[in-house]
Image (tube, rainbow, N blue to C red):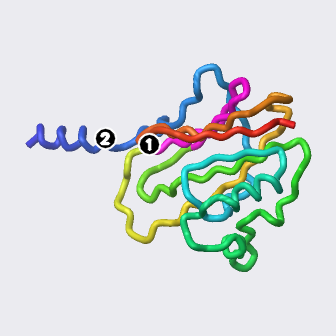
Amino acid sequence: MKRLGVGVAILLLSACDAPWDGPTLPDGSTRLSLTLVTNEGPIGMSPNILASTSLSQLRGEVTSLPSGTNRTRAQLCQGYSGSDPCWNRQVDRPGRLYLAVITTPQCTSPTKNASAIAGHTLYYIEWVGHAQRTCGGAHAWPSWSLFSASRSDLPSSGTLTVRLQFQGTAQGGVESQTALT
C-alpha cells in the first residue's frame, strides 16, 4: 500500500509544474520590457505576431487578416459598450514600437510570458505548462493583444524580426518582420 501511495504521489508531481518553471530567454538575448496597451483586440486566427512603428499601420494589418469567422471588418471592430476591439481609441505615440500578438487561449494549462531582444530579433515567448484540470465550458475565441516597447531599447534602424516562440508543453512559433524607420 505504501508503494502505491508513493507511486501516485510521483505521478501527480510529475504532471504539475514547479513554481520556477517558465520561459527561458534565447541564448545571447536580454530581457525586454513590453508594456501591455490592451488585451482587448479583434478576434483572429492564432498564432501570429506583427509589429510596426505605426499603430495605425499595425491596426490595418491585424484587421485585414482572416479572423476565422465570417464577420466583416466592421463587425470585428464593433465592440460592446465601452470596449475598443480594434484599438481605435489608442493614440499612436512617437518613439514606440507596437507589437500585436495572438495565441490560443489555454483553458486548462497555466501560461507565462517573457520578451527579449537579441540583435535585430525581438522575441515574445509564451510558455505553456501541464494541464491542471479539465475545461468546463465554451472556449474563448483567440483575440489579439497589443503591446508597446520603447524604440530606445531596440536597434535604431534596419529590419526587425519579431518571433513568437512557444515553450513548455507547446512548441513551435511564427515570425514576421517590420522596418525600423
Residue at image mark 2: 13
Residue 96: percent from the left, percent from the top? 84, 43
Q: Amino acid at mark 1?
A: Ala
Residue drawn at (47%, 36%) of the image? 21
Q: Amino acid at mark 2?
A: Leu
Q: Is residue 77 left or right of residue 24?
A: right
Q: Main secondary structure of the magenta part?
A: strand
Q: Which is more toward the observer, 101 or 63?
A: 63
Q: What is the span of residues highlighted in magenta in the rendered image?
A: 113-128
Q: Which is more toward the observer, 50 or 140?
A: 50
Q: Which is more toward the observer, 154 or 180?
A: 180
Give the quarter of the image for residue 89. bottom right
Residue 18: percent from the left, percent from the top? 42, 38
Q: Is residue 19 left or right of residue 45?
A: left
Spatial distance from mark 1 to mark 2, Cα to Cα? 19 Å
Q: Is residue 85 left or right of residue 107?
A: right
Does 66 lie within the magenta span?
no
Residue 134: percent from the left, percent from the top? 35, 61
Mark with earlier residue (1, 2): 2
Identify the element where label 2 is drawn: helix
Identify the element where label 1 is drawn: loop
Looking at the image, residue 52 lies above or below residue 138: above
Q: Which is more toward the observer, 109 or 157?
A: 157
Quarter holding the C terminus is: top right
Q: Residue furthest left?
A: 1
- Rate crowding at label 1 as few (under 14), some (14 to 19) or many (20 or more) other CA atoms within 10 Å: few
Image mark for residue 170:
1
Residue drawn at (77%, 47%) of the image? 98
Residue drawn at (83%, 56%) of the image? 56
Q: How many marks?
A: 2
Q: Is residue 114 visible?
A: no
